[in-house]
Image (spheres, rainbow, N blue to C red):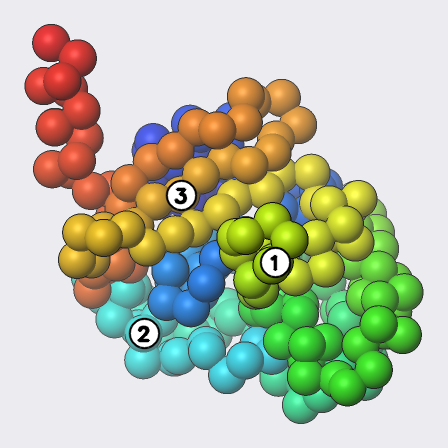
Amino acid sequence: MLSTGIKSLDELLGGGIAEGVLTQVYGSFATGKTTLAIQIGLLSGMKVAYVDTEGGFSPERLSQMAEMRGLNSEEALQRFILFAPGDFKEQRRVIGSLKKVVDKTFSLVIVDSLTAHYRAEEQRRNLTKELAKQLQVLLWIARRNEVPVLVINQVHFDSRAGRMKPVAEHTFNYRTKDILRLEKLSTPGLRVAVLERHRFKPEGGMIFFRITKKGIEEAIETKQENRKENL
């Protein structure tokens, strides 16, 4: 398994990001999805295939996180193999090409996000099957190479449920076995990661975190407050 860089989050996920399965991380804007993905790739120590559909990947941010952790930023940048599809059609080609690119020398595959171009399409209802096919290809890559695949997802407001829900929820849930939801809290800078589903861990567990120059770090003050309440 790959470490997230946060001990409590690794424990929540049953040890970290698992090989051979798809892990879905979803949440609204600026909840830390991309930072978490980059951090996991940075700490993996091997090659990372990063499909950036939103233009959110920042080499400067990766370098900053590496340097703050005492790692070689140039070496880290060289390990990230970046793909930047411009639309949903190109995204299909890129994900298909990963079958020939990814091998045992890769520690992680990241798609950030799988649904950005999908949501931009006017006839996206007709593209749901294609989205499912892309998830199936990613699952094949995960199993074939025994590599973790991290799939970032966006959210939308479901008027019937009266809350935010992941895009193409049913399509994703059939193929992603571990699901992590990230949210902003009312306290400035504070965020929470909630385990919505897991292969063997109970759902509903959560940890609090902050986004820093180092990346994502556990919110120590919240942990201390919880300990005081339990005393």
Helix, strand or loop at label 2? It is helix
Q: Amino acid at mark 3?
A: Ala
Give the Cα distance between marks 3 and 2.
21 Å
Which residue is found at the position 11% from the left and 9% from the top? 231
Label 1: which residue? 158
Label 3: which residue? 193
Label 2: which residue? 61
Q: Amino acid at mark 1?
A: Asp
Q: Position of residue 36 (x, y in %)?
A: 41, 56
For the view shown, which residue lies furthest in the top direction? 231
Residue 186 in the image: above or below residue 60? above
Q: Position of residue 123 (x, y in %)?
A: 83, 82
Depth check, mark 1 against mark 2: the one in front is 1
Q: Amino acid at mark 2?
A: Arg
Q: Position of residue 177 (x, y in %)?
A: 69, 38
Which residue is found at the position 45% from the left and 77% from the top? 57
